[in-house]
Image (spheres, coloured by chain):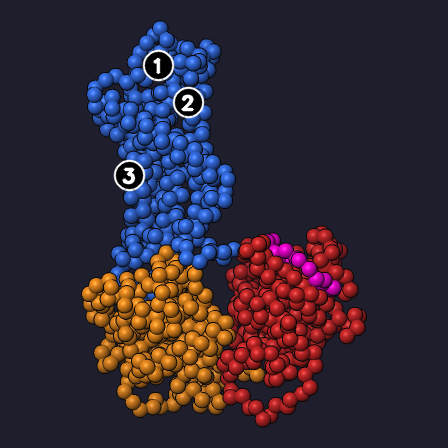
Amino acid sequence: MSENTNILEVQNLRVHFGRGDERVKAVDDVSFTVGRGETVALVGESGSGKSISALSITKLAPRAARYEGGRILFNGQNMLDLSEAELRSVRGSQISYIFQEPMVSFNPVFTIGWQIGEAIKLHRKGIDRKAETKRLLKLVHLPERLASAYPHQMSGGQLQRCMIAMALACSPELLVADEPTTALDVTVQREILNLLLELSEKVGLSILMITHNFGIVSDLADRVYVMKKGRLVEEGTTKNVLYNPQHDYTKQLMAAVPRLRPVEQNSLTTENTENTEESK
Amino acid sequence: MIKQGQSLWSDAWRRLKKDRIAMVCLGLVVLFTLLAVYGEVVYFYHHAKDITPAYQKINLDLAYQAPGAAHWMGTDGLGRDVMQRLVQGVRIAYKVGIITSLIAIPIGVLLGCLAGFYGGKVDDFVVWLYSTFASMPGLLFILAIAMVVPENGLLGVYLGIGLTTWVGLCRLVRGEVLKHKEQTYVQAAKALGLGSGRIMFKHILPNILHVIIVTFTLRFPAAVGTEVIMSYLGIGVQGEPSWGLMIDSARMRLWQGMWWEMTFVTLALFLLVLAFNLLGDALRDALDPRLDD
Amino acid sequence: MKASVISSAAGGEKLLEVEKLNVVYGHGKDAVHAVKGVSFNIQAGEIFGLVGESGCGKSSLGKAIVRLTEPTAGKILFKGTDVSLLKRKALQTYRREVQMVFQDPYGSLNPRLQVGNAIVDVLEVHRIGKTTAERRAKVTELFEAVGLEPDWAWRYPHEFSGGQRQRICIARALALDPDLLVADEPVSALDVSVQAEILALLEDLRKKRQLAFLFVSHDLAVVRNICDRVAVMYNGEIVEMGDVADVIDHPQHEYTRTLLAAVPSF
């Protein structure tokens, strides 16, 4: 793929913790891309390095993390070369994040409207914040009156929508979602996933989704990367990786995932698997 | 990261060792402890043989001697060696710190556990009790107790401080027990049929021991400081060379140019309190059972 | 909401019979009616699933059966005896028959005790085994039954992975040789591959020990794969119940359908 269709290109990223005997290679030579308007999933079990990879994009990994190598090209520019101040201006405005637990991600003493307003103020000066807040709440299908509500008065699903609203406050090009629905009920999860689908179409949002749930990958992602212990193990279109996994680990995972309905093997067509690589 | 095969205690020790300041303070604490023990031995020896110890011998010829070869920290107004009296002061400080803790800690822990674990009326009673104690002006209460207790000055000090300082620990323990009571391992213990007593003392208590240890380490210098104030005010210790008394008697001499008694005693007090406080802070960090970092 | 759809229970020896159970927390205006008149039964050796979203009352129901929470009304008949009001000694005896495995393998173990000692403790309390040596032998036996190395019994919880800790919790629950195990989201906190192992272990234990399970979960796919029958809970009530294949492939109740439609699956 040529450079201008990829909004994000991570090349040979290495992120390590600790030194000497205690060195942990959280992300070990990982490369992935996110095209414009695409939804890409990073999938893996705990310890696979998927979260650290996503956080590293704007150097949001824990302070102890060391970026030992590789490039992170966002719109052609290497994020690892930027200063903290430059990164701060990217975070929230060009690359936004939403995280796992909406219940604890908000400041309990300020209203939702105020907090969304803060996000707007940070990157866009001179805008009518109230009007903009209303527009954002509408975008995530929340009633306007919630702008004056406090976090504890809202449900997990509503808070997650608020988090999405905040993330979209500055019309970012890339949304990084780290297990955004894991802490939510199944029916609420469905709503949030539908919202993300809708937004990616409406606003042309590119999404990098971190998850361990293959059902979500199947519903949302165009392409998926499978990670294990810091390394990339398989990649490809969702259909290929999920229904025709090549790597042993992916096969093991697919076998272990409990299915709601018995898998019908005969109805699946085996396509030519493109972009399937195995890590060395 | 916790290394394989270690209990949480050894891991805490490993973390503490990395903190240089904490190790220095630990060294100071050990030094003071040795001095206290030495002082106790000296006291006991003289007391048993009914001899007046050197630090009590009045010798007006030697009064107000500046620090020199014979007396490294000089002599006080009655010709007594300041350094030896200082060491005796350490002994008294330690006695106060330890004995008041032996009174305050069991009371605080027991009441805190009962209140946190049983809740309801037991909790209401304990909360009422410690709120009442907490609302009384501490020092006055201590002085009142000390004055009521006849003869032996130190007993009054012990009771006074011990019976008023259990409040802070009780609150802390109660909070921790409340927190742990909701933990799954306690629920599991209940489901497995373990009785309340067993759960409280065999399961919860070891998990809040670190809080008690840190509280002791921080309460110790506070108790010492309180005793110093009491002796300074003339309540409590009489005759024995406690730091409070030494500071009081040195006070007048200071502006006559006799700086040594006041300086050395204050310095010793400062170092002891500082060492314990810094060590307590470091212990709090090292003992924190948060495993993911 | 339509009235609940409950298919008749299959025949067989009823190990547990719950009749119109109610669990209410608090009183007066702030009372929370977590479980509203729930009735169902579990047979010996059956794996019975209880699904629902947060706040539906499934955890409260599980806890009431293990008597960690007190039922406020209704009956819990275990092998014919009403255990909902038992106290002290009788309650202690009941605890040997019904045990619980919790969701959080990290918080379920006392971090200050070697895991083997935690189990020895339980055996001591119930006077199983006459000497410490006998009890330790039982610990070895239990560890082997859950697929763990017996030597590991003398390590601390933080030295184990999530899956291993859950195995230890299962071993601990088995120490009293219960007939029914209430498992409250036992695999929800585990990775997919570990999940599969633990589920296989539970299935294995069911076969070897004729152990029945009340499997509480929010994950319909997991329930589909391990349970024989399932009850769907919503707002404190059971809205649908039946064989797991029936309920999941042919849901009758509106809520069940909504729930199934919401699950992202492939």
* Mark sitting on residue B103: 3
Read off the residue under disc 2.
B265
For badge 2, the amino acid type reads Val
Chain C drawn colour: orange
- In front of the other: B96 or B141: B96
The red-tinted chain is A
Up/down of B157 relative to B75, above or below: below
Which circle's residue, 3 or 2, is located before the other in the chain? Answer: 3
Which circle's residue, 3 or 1, is located before the other in the chain? Answer: 1
Residue A122 placement, left or right of A190? right
- In front of the other: A153 or B241: B241
* Mark sitting on residue A199: none
A64 magenta-colored: yes
Read off the residue under disc 1.
B80
- Part of the protein shown in magenta: A60-74
Label 3 residue SS: helix
Locate residue B181: give its quadrant.
Answer: bottom left
Disc 2 + disc 1, Cβ < 8 Å: no
- In front of the other: C247 or B90: B90
